[in-house]
Image (cartoon, grey):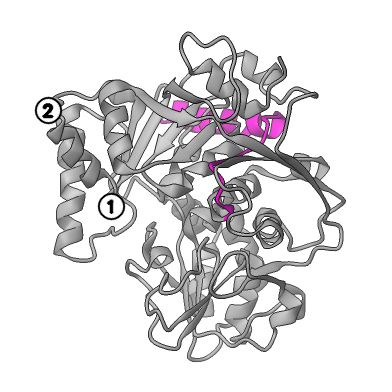
Amino acid sequence: MAYTITEKILLKHAPGKQDIHPGEFIWAKIDLTLANDITAPLAIEEFRKAGAKKVFDAKKMVLVPDHFTPAKDLKSANQAKLLADFAREQGIKNYFEIGQMGIEHALLPELGLIHPGDLIIGADSHTCTYGALGAFSTGMGSTDIAASWITGFTWLRVPQTLKFIYKGKLKKWVGGKDLILYTIGDIGVDGALYKAMEFSGPVIEKLGMDSRLSLCNMAIEAGGKSGIIAPDEVTFEYIRAARCRLQAAGNKTRSLQPEARSKLKSDSDAQYAEIKEYDVSDLEPQVACPHLPSNVKGVSQLKDVKVDQVVIGSCTNGRISDLRVAAKVMKGKKVKSNLRVIVIPATQNVYKQAIKEGLLELFAKAGCVISTSTCGPCLGGHCGLLADGETAIATTNRNFFGRMGSPKSFVYLSNPAVAAASAVTGRITHPDEIR
């Protein structure tokens, strides 16, 4: 029987199953489960209510305090402490405190915790990010996560798969963020509702891993259950680099299963709910306008939109390549007067690498403020909320009413190059305008 890559992964993780089909409910064994300082406390509470004493496997759990940390108030401090205490109690090695951590969906791939063929669930909707490495990964509620901590399993309805094929050659300043914004603009915020979004084609094959992570990160913004890209040499080189970093630090790494290299791809005759093809040769940088990620326009259509704040960071676009692009645009320039520009490296390692390359100094000289790794303003948590009537352009992933502060504010979503150019001019700007 022919299967998509998603169906193959789920079948492999469903003990006793000989075949699988979309719409079927399965009991699936998990490889990794994660939660953060907002969602883990709820899961811990449910874990206790169930009478559980020990998690199923401490090595397969990850806890990251990244949303309201460094603690923004007493409540967030107590939530973070609950996380730390639970990690110590359960012997969870993969607990990452500030100073070692990062935004979870940038951190886990960086640390080599994600492998092709994995089944990963997390108490955060952007867990779909890890599909960029050929894993099935999806977000769930804290109660489901608590159940997974007890049993090592989760229940799933096997999703149908939408296949997206991207052809052509990308223009300068266009990357994974623009591809996913363009796609969401086409199919809508419910266009992939409870479906796996499989990204493929010659354009995807040439994308670097950071762009792939950005692309899969926003599958949820189209309603997707997951996003996924079949692993290839780009994937394996990324994993090798992560393993080398860990080994150099004296940490053990997971072995990569050999079948991941040759067999983890969709069969040529696999069945899809729909196949969509795009020629993106003429695609310019895309911008999602308030108040939906699907309200997408080309950057050239928005040059009269003034902004009060720029945010460069998040689990979507806070990796080192994102900061390099932003720095390239801003080099030798200054932030527009009376404009706030916040740069947030996605992990501590990204922060250190940005220091080494002189990027943070460049941003500081330009007039930006640089934050430690945090989700912060993305969810309207802290470190950059908007007041009534203010407008921001951000490299984040959502722009709903009140997402970044006041329900009377406005958020535009873009790639790092557009955000950096807009920081210089004070209005939404194509990078070519200033470079």
Q: Earlier in the sequence, mark 1 or mark 2?
A: 1
- The residue drawn where x is 55% and y is 84% is 307
How far apart marks 1 and 2 lie (CA) works out to 22 Å
List the residue tagged with mark 1. Answer: 38
In this rendering, position of residue 219 left or right of residue 91:
right
Q: Nearer the viewer, mark 1 or mark 2?
A: 2
Residue 160: x %, y % from top left:
62, 35
Amino acid residing under circle 1: Ile
Amino acid residing under circle 2: Gly
- Residue 44 position by quadrant: top left
Q: Quadrant of the C terminus?
A: bottom right
Residue 213 sits above or below residue 121 on the image: below
**Quick one: which residue is furthest to the front in this view?**
23
- The residue drawn where x is 74% and y is 60% is 174
Q: Which residues are magenta?
A: 222-249
**242 drawn magenta:** yes
- The residue drawn where x is 15% and y is 40% is 85
| Disc number placed over residue 51 in the picture, else none | 2
Q: Main secondary structure of the magenta part?
A: helix
* Local SS, label 2: loop
In this rendering, position of residue 45 left or right of residue 281:
left
